[in-house]
């Protein structure tokens, strides 16, 4: 029996949350109705784990998480969609900035915001913000994009219990897709870069929720009897992508795939580092050409793998 | 007029000093003095604080009153340095708020959490092990309270219970809810005290924070330091009136108003309020009417006419009415005894002239 992307991530997340003590788990409708579109199902209370349904005050929710964290407690906030977190920007920038500048003698707790990025396109202007990397860039916080069971397990199990703050996000567009599990070859200690494939003819680096497209490109390159290395990059400050940079230099051909919108793509920063390291790398970038949209429309990210591969090997 | 720079050395031998006036004795008799204890600026002196005393000359001064006088001196000393532009960071002093600051500082216990605003100088001075560390922080010294990394407006000192300070109006209320929620998860009888002002009442964060606190019955005291002003604008010049008591009533939150700058009364009322919260977790709001007696944050660029010019050389009293907590002390004890109090306090000068 197959399970969906959303079901698989819910299992990974709830398994981890249900192991946490000294924790407040909270969110709007997290214990009833749709369980935040299924995201918070199976999360249960424990002796020192409170599961609380809360009202509509997202700014306060974010401050509460930081307060708990500073007090040495853990907080897991479930949020239906990333757009709501625009209301918490002050806390991500000011409060979190102050926490980073303070020397604490007692250990901090852990604060994780679990949310979905509404990248399907039919919610219109109210959910036109997709830029987890932009929130992370403003605040210096880390953001992790869960793409498959393997990286989700790795990220959730190692990041969520850590002292400090981070976002963990999933794609609404992929909610009903069949769950996948591609074996991880390696990952950086901070989970900023995860490698899924190793090859010698090209390097593919995926940003946003584009791992699925990266895998298609690996397959298309395989059809030419060539091999490619495949990486995904999370939104982590000072991402440890030096191995991917070296691989791009070694393989000479680089394909960057980015399904996020907005001018602050991390792909450009990565590319700058690659070209600084080796200006002879040939590259192509596959991304939304129209950077910003507020109209209601299908925003499926589509491109011809074969033509991209043909271009890079031409 | 006294000046700490010219103050003669005073011997604190009780027998060699004059008796306090009869009026002061009578007033003191109203307190139940149970033991003599020197004020320890660090950590909360919780429980019966109002009855704790400090020996001044040949009489005893309630510990809160002593702290009021010391906070006045220390802040005035810092104010003199602000005028000389000694610090690169702006410092928001709280001259005129000393009764409130002393009372809050005395009722907050070691296990409690105190969250402040950008106008946190007096609180940090009150709770620091060494108030000079706060000044060192303003100098961005590695020996400062926060190793020179937080400066003034965000100065916190978790070791002293000041767990967070924010310069964003209303920002600290939701963070305080988080601290209070943590205390609830842990059990015990700790509380969270968060300071805010009449400016924050204009922020949405104020309302959603209080609704959240009430919805989850958090052990939270929200203290509104209402000084009427947002820099140069009085409330009547910038917005409609907000009936805070009525708002609190509408969501079932207890409300207490404090006026008059009598620190002993403030301590007593806040101890009663915090005692209730420690046994029956539920948020409450305390609105305290204060008058800010200093410039916004030292000399303010673009505002040379900021009227609040105060000078240490004029002594500790700034305003000759109850808007000044130190004047309240002077009125209570009389000229002669107050002079002794002043002398005692000046002996605890920060000595900022000696770097």
Image (cartoon, rainbow, N blue to C red):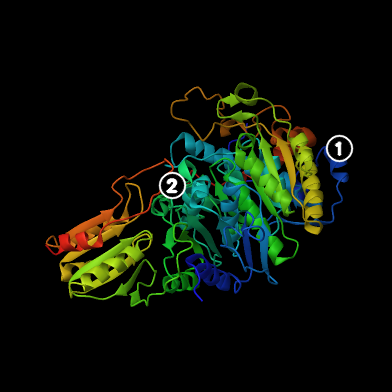
The number of numbered badges drawn on the structure is 2
User: Can residue B59 be seen in the rendering of this structure?
Assistant: no
Quadrant assignment for the C terminus of chain A:
bottom left
**Which x, y percent locates residue B139?**
44, 48
Q: Are marks 1 and 2 in contact (CB under 8 Å)?
A: no
* Residue A10 falls left or right of residue B264: left
Q: Residue at x 75, y 65 (%)?
A: B188
Q: Residue at x 47, y 30 (%)?
A: B300
Chain of the residue under label 2: A
* Residue A246 falls left or right of residue B79: left
The residue nearer to you, when weighing B310 against A118, is A118
Q: Secondary structure at mark 2?
A: loop
Q: Residue at x 55, y 55 (%)?
A: A79
Mark 1 — residue?
B22
Question: Could you tell me how far apart the alpha carbons at marks 1 and 2 are, in whole angstroms?
Answer: 72 Å
**Which x, y percent locates residue A112?**
53, 62
Label 2 Cα crowd, 10 Å radius (few <14 / some 14-19 / many 20+) = many
Mark 2 — residue?
A129
Residue B140 in the image: above or below residue A155: above
Report the disc number at residue A90. none
Label 1 Cα crowd, 10 Å radius (few <14 / some 14-19 / many 20+) = few
The residue nearer to you, when weighing A281 against A275, is A281
Q: Secondary structure at mark 1?
A: helix
**Which x, y percent locates residue A14?**
57, 70
């Amino acid at each position: 029996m197959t399970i969906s992307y959303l079901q698989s991530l819910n299992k990974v997340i709830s398994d981890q949350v249900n192991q946490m003590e000294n924790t407040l788990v909270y969110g709007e409708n997290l214990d009833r109705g749709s369980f935040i579109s299924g995201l918070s199902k199976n999360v249960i209370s424990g002796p020192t784990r409170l599961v609380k349904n809360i009202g509509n005050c997202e700014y306060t929710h974010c401050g509460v998480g930081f307060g708990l964290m500073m007090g040495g407690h853990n907080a897991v906030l479930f949020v239906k969609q990333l757009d709501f977190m625009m209301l918490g920007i002050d806390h991500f920038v000011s409060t979190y900035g102050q926490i980073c500048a303070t020397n604490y003698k007692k250990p901090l707790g852990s604060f994780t915001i679990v949310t979905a990025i509404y990248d399907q396109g039919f919610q219109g202007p109210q959910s036109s913000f997709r830029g987890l990397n932009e929130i992370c860039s403003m605040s210096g916080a880390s953001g992790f994009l869960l793409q498959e069971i393997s990286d989700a397990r790795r990220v959730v199990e190692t990041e969520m219990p850590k002292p400090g703050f981070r976002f963990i996000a999933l794609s609404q567009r992929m909610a009903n897709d069949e769950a996948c599990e591609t074996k991880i070859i390696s990952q950086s200690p901070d989970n900023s870069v995860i490698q899924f494939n190793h090859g010698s003819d090209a390097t593919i680096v995926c940003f946003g929720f584009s791992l699925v497209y990266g895998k298609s490109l690996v397959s298309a390159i395989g059809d030419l009897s060539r091999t490619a290395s495949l990486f995904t990059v999370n939104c982590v400050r000072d991402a440890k992508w030096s191995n991917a940079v070296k691989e791009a230099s070694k393989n000479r051909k680089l394909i960057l795939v980015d399904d996020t919108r907005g001018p602050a793509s991390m792909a450009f920063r990565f590319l700058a580092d690659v070209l600084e390291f080796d200006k002879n790398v040939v590259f192509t970038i596959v991304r939304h050409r129209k950077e910003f949209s507020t109209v209601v429309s299908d925003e499926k990210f589509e491109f011809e793998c074969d033509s991209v591969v043909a271009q890079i090997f031409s | 007029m006294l000046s700490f720079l010219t103050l003669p050395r005073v011997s604190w031998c009780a027998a060699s000093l004059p008796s306090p006036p009869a009026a002061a004795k009578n007033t003191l008799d109203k307190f139940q003095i149970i033991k003599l204890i020197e004020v320890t600026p660090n950590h909360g002196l919780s429980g019966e604080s109002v009855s704790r005393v400090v020996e001044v000359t040949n009489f005893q001064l309630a510990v809160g009153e002593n702290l009021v006088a010391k906070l006045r001196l220390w802040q005035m000393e810092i104010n003199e340095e602000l005028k000389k532009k000694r610090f690169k960071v702006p410092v928001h002093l709280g001259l005129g708020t000393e009764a409130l600051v002393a009372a809050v500082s005395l009722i907050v216990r070691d296990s409690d959490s105190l969250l402040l605003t950008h106008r946190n100088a007096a609180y940090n001075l009150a709770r620091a092990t060494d108030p000079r560390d706060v000044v060192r922080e303003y100098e961005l010294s590695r020996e400062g309270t926060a190793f020179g990394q937080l400066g003034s407006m965000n100065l916190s000192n978790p070791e002293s219970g000041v767990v967070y300070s924010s310069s964003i109006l209303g920002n600290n209320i939701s963070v305080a809810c988080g601290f209070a929620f943590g205390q609830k998860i842990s059990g015990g009888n700790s509380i969270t005290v968060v300071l805010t002002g009449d400016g924050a009442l204009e922020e949405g964060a104020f309302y959603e924070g209080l609704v959240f606190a009430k919805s989850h019955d958090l052990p939270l005291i929200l203290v509104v330091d209402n000084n009427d002003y947002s820099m140069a604008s009085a409330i009547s010049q910038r917005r409609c009136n907000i009936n805070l008591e009525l708002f609190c009533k509408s969501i079932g939150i207890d409300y207490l108003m404090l006026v008059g700058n009598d620190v002993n009364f403030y301590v007593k009322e806040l101890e009663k309020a915090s005692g209730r919260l420690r046994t029956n977790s539920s948020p409450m709001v305390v609105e305290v009417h204060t008058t800010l007696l200093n410039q916004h944050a030292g000399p303010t660029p673009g505002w040379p006419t900021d009227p609040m010019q105060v000078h240490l050389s004029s002594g500790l009293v700034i305003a000759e009415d109850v808007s000044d907590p130190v004047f309240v002390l002077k009125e209570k004890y009389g000229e002669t005894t107050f002079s002794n109090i002043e002398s005692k306090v000046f002996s605890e000068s920060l000595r900022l002239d000696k770097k």
